Image (cartoon, rainbow, N blue to C red):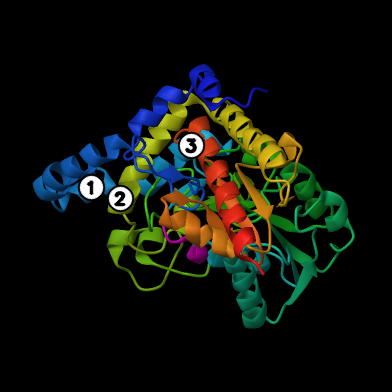
Amino acid sequence: MTLDPAALDAADPLADHRDRFVGADSDLVYLDGNSLGRPLRATVERMGRFVTDEWGGRLIRGWDERWFELPLMLGDRLAAAVLGAAAGQTAIGDSTTVLLYKLVRAAVTAHPGRTEIVIDRDNFPTDRYVVEGVARECGLTVRWLDVEPAGGLTPEALAGVVGEQTALVLVSHVAYRSGWLADAAGITRVAHDAGAWVLLDLCHSSGAVPVELDAWQVDLAVGCTYKYLNGGPGAPGFGYVARRHLEAEAFHQPVWGWMGSADPFAMGQGYSPAAGIRRLISGTPPVVGMLALEDMVDLLAEVGIDAVRQKSVALTSYVIDLVDRDLPQVALASPREPGGRGGHVTIDHPAMRGVTTALWRRDVLPDFRNPDGLRLGLSPLTTSFAEVAAGVAAIATELAALEQVRP
């Protein structure tokens, strides 16, 4: 693979899509697209039309005309474009944390008599905190799994801890720090052999890595929409519940609200859940927060998730090649094998906290992850190879400057 960024950008079949995003033509080197994606230019127009036409023009009629069904309609479109899921199993709404709580509680409720939730210690803090909170609330035990810092949960490691007391296994499809890409199908088989459900966190994979929720037989999934799905700060999350659990009425989420009831406008006494995935919804859905996501789902459906993944692999491979050549003093803290990692790469060095601060001052924006990690998040449709090369060069410069001032 050539290391010439200009040649790589010229050969990139997705390069032209970069111009469709706000700010992509600036001099800013943005290597944190897996924390917050750039907005699409189309979203600027959509939001203006929404304020004047739908909100300002239709007012409350908008609920009957589009908004009431939007969480389910957009959920189906997202499922088809990037989740590998048939219609009727995905809903948009709530924060990722709230959806995690709903799904974890629903999973343990569906397994009465089972007392354990399995999760790895390197999972994202919210996932761990929600599991700890539900365990305390329900009198359950958390079974912690230790994983390698540059790796993640494997089916083999899971097989050693699941058993007849396991109600749920919660795993991130792509590890937030290392970028480890989990074998979701294999993990699900191990959990199912023990009679447990799997909840897959897709925050760092949806929109960058192909997902096949139905084919993998995953029970539950959750994800955010502001990273590779470019939904904007505070954009709502999404939740998936396998059809078999909805049809068997084995899924019962704990936050009862009027829009998830069987007849919301009856305003009746007593809660009766709606049929299907609508029962995951609680209160009024964040209509404004879904607008940007609509545009990104359109683009992903146009481009295709497989093409996005090819670009993602090329970008992360390029980062590793540059690091090997130009940053011999750092340690790679992500899988070297392309098939084993998601859309970001983490490199470790004791000075990375200071390096990150210095980079931000010069408009080079990666992310820092404790204790020593600098994380390069490469959003495939917005990141150029030239941007990556400039970022790695800036890291080399700042590391050299810090090393020179050491006593």
**SS of the residue under disc 2:** helix
In the image, residue 133 lies at what x, y percent? 61, 77
Residue at 33% across, 69% down: 268
Tell me: 192 left or right of 213. Answer: right
Question: Was residue 266 drawn as part of the magenta stretch in this picture?
Answer: no
In the image, residue 76 lies at what x, y percent? 46, 39
Q: Name the amino acid, label 2.
A: Phe
Residue at 52% across, 48% down: 34
Residue at 69% across, 35% down: 321
Quadrant of the snapshot with the C terminus: bottom right
Is residue 300 placed above or below 32 in the rendered structure?
above
Quadrant of the snapshot with the N terminus: top right
Q: Name the amino acid, label 1.
A: Asp
Distance from disc 1 to disc 3, alpha carbons, whole Å, reads: 45 Å
| Residue 269 figure quarter | bottom left
**SS of the residue under disc 3:** helix
Tell me: 349 left or right of 306. Answer: right
Magenta-colored span: 93-98
Q: Residue 68 got which mark?
A: 2
CB-based contact (under 8 Å), mark 2 and mark 1:
yes
| Residue 39 figure quarter | top left
CB-based contact (under 8 Å), mark 3 and mark 2:
no
Query: Between tags 3 and 2, which lies in front?
Result: 3
Residue named by callout 1: 64
Residue at 68% across, 58% down: 349
